Image (cartoon, rainbow, N blue to C red):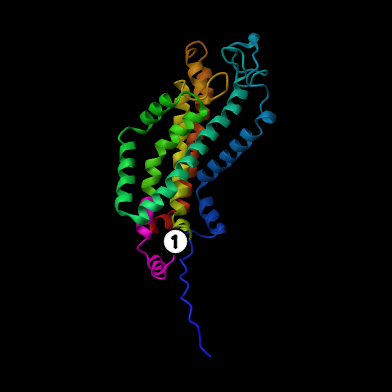
Amino acid sequence: MTATLSPPTIESPAPRRRGSGRLLRRFARNKWGGVAAVYLVLLVLVAIFAPLVAPMDPLAQDLNAVNQPPSAAHWLGADDVGRDILSRIIYGSRVSLIAGVSSVLLSLLVALPIGLVAGYVGGLVDTVVMRLGDALQTLPALVLALTLSAVLGPGLRNATIALAIVFLPTFLRLVRGQVIAIRKETYIEASQSIGTPGLTIMRKRILPNIASPLIVQCAVSMAFALLAEAALSFLGLGVQPPEPSWGRMLATSYTYVYSAGWQVFMPGIAIVVTVLAVTLFADALRDSLGREIRRA
């Protein structure tokens, strides 16, 4: 009777993450991170259920309430054509969240496979990818976003595409750097020695172990995306009127900054608080996953 020997199976170490319970406990230690998380959850719910939460139609005009200060009828006042500011802020949160999440996810979906291949294969592929990334970073991020939005034309979709292109170099460098750090690990070399295909190694061995820094970078990039979308809308390159947008509301109310200055503060506060919440959430997430990121 002849025994048949099969090649050993090489298992990669568990992804660099802790159990959900331990991660939540770490996150809960950061008080401001918890507050930010609660705020962001509420903001998402408000954006989803905006028709139920908003007291009025954001496009409805009340000419008797033009530039009316906060009152019982309009809790945050009315704008230059009598539209309820609170309702427009609620609906405007949809634009900010869609632009922030969509641009980050689109950039990540493009950069992830390219960065994985560039970091794993190296050589000419890595050189070409990094030089293209360097070319995109020759301009400041906001200037590049403005240029791309002007070329593509105004609108939420084009603004999202412009922001996604701006984020590409950051995600490319992050993914490539993490892959280069991991590809020399023993379990990667062992997988290569038994003939495991490169795509399988990248998908099953490398990708789970670079998830932590990618998650943190997505949260950090969202804060910039929110500010950039507001800036593009303020300059007329984002959402077009009469659709509500926080940046567009700032541009409209700026005309009346001396006669009805409170109009500027309402969308401005919404932008500042939301960006601050995303930043605090990203910091808390970074601290919670810090050990895994430092190992990578």
Residue type at numbered disc 1: Ile
Q: Is 190 a magenta residue? A: yes
| Lateral position of residue 171 relative to residue 75, left or right | left
Q: Residue furthest right?
A: 52
Q: Which residues are magenta?
A: 176-200
Q: Residue furthest bottom?
A: 1
Where 174 sits versus 9, above or below?
Answer: above
Q: Is 268 a magenta residue? A: no
- Say which residue appears at 63% left-offset and 11% top-offset: 65
Magenta span: helix, strand or loop, mainly? helix
Where 210 sits versus 278, above or below?
Answer: below
Q: How many marks?
A: 1
Mark 1 surroundings: few (<14), some (14-19) or many (≥20) residues within 10 A: some
| Lateral position of residue 151 relative to residue 264, left or right | left
Instruction: Place residue 94 in its image quadrant.
Output: top right
Q: Position of residue 146 (x, y in %)?
A: 40, 27
Q: Nearer the viewer, residue 186 or 97?
A: 186
- Say which residue appears at 38% left-offset and 60% top-offset: 182
Where 48 sits versus 198, above or below?
Answer: above
Q: Position of residue 203 (x, y in %)?
A: 47, 57
Q: Position of residue 216 (x, y in %)?
A: 45, 47
Q: Residue furthest front?
A: 1
Q: Secondary structure at mark 1?
A: helix
Residue carrying label 1: 201
Q: Position of residue 296 (x, y in %)?
A: 39, 57
Instruction: Place residue 47 in its image quadrant.
Output: top right
- Say which residue appears at 39% left-offset and 59% top-offset: 295
Where 239 sits versus 28, above or below?
Answer: above
Q: Nearer the viewer, residue 81 or 211?
A: 211
